[in-house]
Amino acid sequence: MSMTRLNVLRRMFIWVLLFLFLLVFPPSSSFASSLLGLNGRDYFRVSTLAVMIGDAELGSNDTLTNNVAKAIEAKLVTDVGVGYSGALGFDFDSGLTTELEYSYRSVDTNSITSSIGEVDAPGKYTLNTLMGNVGERFLSSSEFTPYLGGGLGIAWHQIDDDDIGFGAYDSTFVYQLLVGVEYSINSDTKLGLGYGFLGTSDPDFEGATVDIGVHNIGVTFRQYWSGEPVRRTKRKRVSKTELFEKPPKERKKLSVPPLRKTKYDQKSEKDNRSYEGYLIPR
């Protein structure tokens, strides 16, 4: 499959998933804003990233070549790169979040080092990912909200060497771990700073494998669609005696089953006549 055809299929796959996600979580101003009838709010998130790849150990599908590469500790050295990500998500009123995220990262390759020397390897490594993330925002009365999260998805790798005109690509499964803190500018707008680690199975570049682990430090902007966040409050228990004494409007505010009006069998102590009252539900 050619590189051009692979890029077209990749973009089609991304847009189809984004379309399906919007069907499930359409933008809305109401609290129960998804087709699933869940309480919460939709949001979009964008992030800018500083990208650093740790020691990328080189290997090979050929056993002998792989053993030699491991023996001499061959590693690909890269510069600090940049990246960005965008996501559409749903924030439950409990602090749980789910989202679909697309990200792009690019770093320049510098050299290949080993115990026997160093070789220049100028080029570029790019990484595109499409992931489903789940996170937890630890809600409090403070303007700062810490969060933890993680995700699973698929990654598209591409590496190019400018000197020898080499270019290769591969796709793998990928996972990520996220931690950070957000500041509430207002109820709908959040600004955050976070760290993420992205790990992937080793991509295969025409027989050569690379053990890649990506460290990301990013600034995040999250915007909710209109609607105030719902805060769960513990309902105060009301005794049957207190409930009987409250007028109908107050009982309605307590979100309890309505009392059934019925005629009591007992008689009034004053005039010995039957009277109507409210039957307390069991």
Image (cartoon, rainbow, N blue to C red):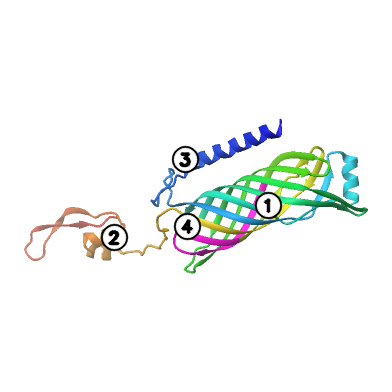
Residue 132 appears at what percent x and percent y?
Answer: 58, 46
Q: Which residue is mark 4?
A: 94
Segment colored magenta: 174-193
Total number of numbered labels? 4
Residue 142 % position (x, y) = 49, 69
Q: Upstream in the sequence, badge 1 or badge 3?
A: 3
Label 1 element class: strand
* Nearest to N terminus: mark 4 or mark 3: 3
Instruction: Check the picture and name the quadrant holding the N terminus.
Output: top right
* Mark before the other along the chain sequence, 1 or 2: 1
> Between 213 and 239, which is closer to the camera in this rendering?
213
Amino acid beneath label 2: Lys
Q: Nearer the viewer, residue 128 or 262?
A: 128
Magenta stretch: residue 182 in it? yes
Q: Which residue is mark 2?
A: 253
Q: Quadrant of residue 244?
A: bottom left
Gap in angstroms between the C-alphas marked 1 and 2: 49 Å
Label ID, residue 198: 1
Which mark is in front, 3 or 2?
3
Q: State the CA–CA distance, disc 1 to disc 3.
A: 28 Å
Describe residue 55's horizontal placement relative to residue 25 as left or right.
right
At a point 30% along the width and 60% down the height, the residue shown is 254
Amino acid at the residue labelled 3: Leu
**Is 107 left or right of 24, judged from the image as shown?**
right
- For marks 4 and 3, give the one nearer the viewer: 3
Q: Name the residue tied to disc 3.
A: 23
The image position of residue 266, as x and y in percent, is 14, 58
